[in-house]
Image (cartoon, rainbow, N blue to C red):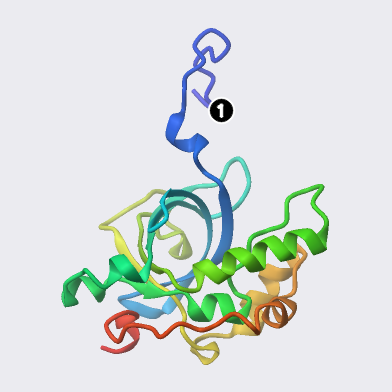
Amino acid sequence: MSNCDVDAAAHAQDVGPVKNLCAFLNAFHVYASDTKRFVETNHYCSHVSEDFRQCILYDAPGPNARLIGVEYMITPRLFETLPVEEKHYWHSHVFEVKSGMLIMPQPAGASQSAWEAAETKEMVEVVKLYGKVYHLWQTDRGDALPLGPPQLMTSFTHEGQFDFDKYVGDRDKRFGVEHKRKQALRKDIEEPKVDKNADWAWKQ
């Protein structure tokens, strides 16, 4: 059985939660247990409330992409309520946003100027959020199935942590974007102060 061919014409189902997906983002996640390993990740997100978002993660944007994990995003207001040990599981989005690593790929038919304005406006909000990510499928090591325990992931926080220009540059070519242009468009986005207990993988 493939491509949802369960006699869909006769048995159309309501895939309610998926209908709430309203944002597509692309960035890179790093293994918290081994910061030399990282994976390009496509996020499909819904806004549960003004303080909470949830994302399904895939290894590609195409119809046959593999679901590799989940990410939750919360505002500083919620993050501040967490115990110190729990905060260690969460990462910031400041570098992702300001560096141009985090993008919202432009949909077909949208003008570049209008889309960039909308994307930049969204980044004003995302830059403040904290994310908690688990990957279930270690595609970077060639696993044919989602094997082993879930892997806590984190984010890059500085450009020198990996070959930024190579990997982000390769991604840019595939999506037809330029991270340096994103940097320029986002230069006036205010950088929030990141809680000292976030991004813990880089501090151990």
* Quadrant position of residue 120: bottom right
**Coordinates of residue 86 in the picture (x, y in percent):** 20, 70
Residue 81 position by quadrant: bottom left
Q: Nearer the viewer, residue 145 or 164?
A: 164
In percent of width and height, residue 113 lies at: 81, 64
- In this rendering, the answer to whether 188 lies above or below 45 is below
The extreme top residue here reads 10
Q: Is residue 67 left or right of residue 63?
A: left
Q: Looking at the image, which is closer to me, 143 or 170? A: 170
Left or right of 130? Residue 63 is right
Classify 10 as above or below 77. Answer: above
Q: Which residue is mark 1?
A: 3
Q: In x, y percent, where is residue 34?
A: 35, 78
For image coordinates 61% across by 50% down, the residue present is: 61
Q: Nearer the viewer, residue 172 or 90?
A: 90
Residue plotted at (39% across, 54% down): 70
Q: Quadrant of residue 74?
A: bottom left
Number of residues whose C-alpha sits closer than 10 Å to that of mark 1, classed few (under 14), some (14–19) or many (20 or more): few
Residue shown at the point (47%, 65%) measured from the top left? 140
